[in-house]
Amino acid sequence: MKIQTSVRVEDKFYREAKKVFAAFGMSFGDATNIFLAKVAMEKRFPFDLSITDELSSRIKNIDNNRNSSIYKDAKELAEDLGI
């Protein structure tokens, strides 16, 4: 059985990713299903996720309310980062 769902994604990433998927002859849905199948089979993300020293330091700053900013949405954060 298949279910239908919706996700909010950044337009820029969506458009760029769709070009990559198209080069492989697949749709966004096909690529999403491949990702979900890999996660289900491997019981982990199919790529490395790690906490670097910098990220660890930033987490401590957030926990201690130092050198951190709060954004109302991802767009505001992206603008602040210049991306």
Image (cartoon, rainbow, N blue to C red):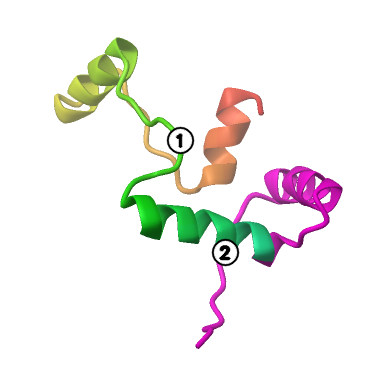
Image x and y of residue 36, in percent: 48, 60
> Is 36 displayed left or right of 20 in the figure?
left
Label 2 sits on what residue type?
Asn
Magenta residue check for 53 = no
Identified by mark 1, the residue type is Phe
Query: Tag 2, which secondary structure?
Result: helix
Give the residue displayed 65% in from the left and 24% down from the top.
82
Residue 6, by quadrant, is bottom right
* Above-or-below relation of 23 to 65: below
**Residue 29 is at least partly visible in this image:** yes
Region rendered in magenta: 1-29
Q: Return the residue at label 1.
A: 47
Residue 70's x, y, as percent? 37, 37
Image disc number at residue 33: 2
**Is residue 66 in sight in this rendering?**
no
Which residue is situated farthest in the left direction here?
Answer: 64
Cβ–Cβ under 8 Å for marks 2 and 1: no
In which quadrant of the rendered image does the C terminus lie?
top right
Residue plotted at (52% across, 84% down): 3
Determine whether the residue tagged by mark 1 lies in a helix, strand or loop.
loop
Looking at the image, which is closer to me, 54 or 77? 54
Q: Is residue 41 above or below residue 53?
A: below
Return the disc, 2 or 1, that comes first in the chain's sequence.
2
Between 68 and 8, which is closer to the camera in this rendering?
8
The image quadrant of residue 54 is: top left
> Does residue 17 belong to the magenta stretch?
yes
